[in-house]
Image: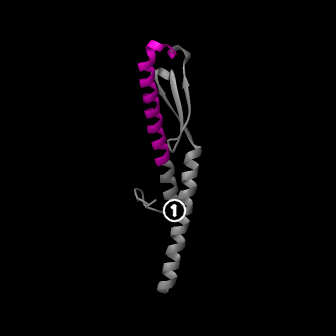
């Protein structure tokens, strides 16, 4: 049977390993890209899986002053679409990382 000191040391090492893997996963999330669309693809927003906006593309047909309110709505809708996709990708990647650590599904880490 292990001593209390050995058990504490093993727990600390396990926590450090989990922290390292979670940091690597967070870095990976910023490299994964998703694209949100609105207006049938007239407005596109690219985001990282962490939600960082990478780029916005607006079809030339929307560049009319009288269409400004519609364009603003389409930009918001495209961002929201990208954000939903980013959250989905992030959840998938975090689940993979947790599974690789042997943690049960749905286990919440304090990070």
Q: Is residue 98 covered in magenta? A: no
10 and 76: which is toward the camera:
76
- Label 1 residue SS: loop
* Residue, disc 1: 101
Position above or below: 81 against 11: above
Spot occupied by residue 75 in the image (x, y as percentages of width and height): 46, 27
The span shown in magenta is 62-91
Please tell me which residue is depicted at 49% across the width and 47% down the height of the picture. 90
Spot occupied by residue 57 in the image (x, y as percentages of width and height): 56, 25
- Label 1 CA crowd tier, 10 Å (few <14, some 14–19, many 20+): some
Please tell me which residue is depicted at 58% across the width and 56% down the height of the picture. 24
Q: Is residue 65 covered in magenta? A: yes
Please tell me which residue is depicted at 50% across the width and 16% down the height of the picture. 62
Spot occupied by residue 107 in the image (x, y as percentages of width and height): 41, 59
Main secondary-structure element of the magenta-colored stretch: helix
Badge count: 1
């Amino acid at each position: 049977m292990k001593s209390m000191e050995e058990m504490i040391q093993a727990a600390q090492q396990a926590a450090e390993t989990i922290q390292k893997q979670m940091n690597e996963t967070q870095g990976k999330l910023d490299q994964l890209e998703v694209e949100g669309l609105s207006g049938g693809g007239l407005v596109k927003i690219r985001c990282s899986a962490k939600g960082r906006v990478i780029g916005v593309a607006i079809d030339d047909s929307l560049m009319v002053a009288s269409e400004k309110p519609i364009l603003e709505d389409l930009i918001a809708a495209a961002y929201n679409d990208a954000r939903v996709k980013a959250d989905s990708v992030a959840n998938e990647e975090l689940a993979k990382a947790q599974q690789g650590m042997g943690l049960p599904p749905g286990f919440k880490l304090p990070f």
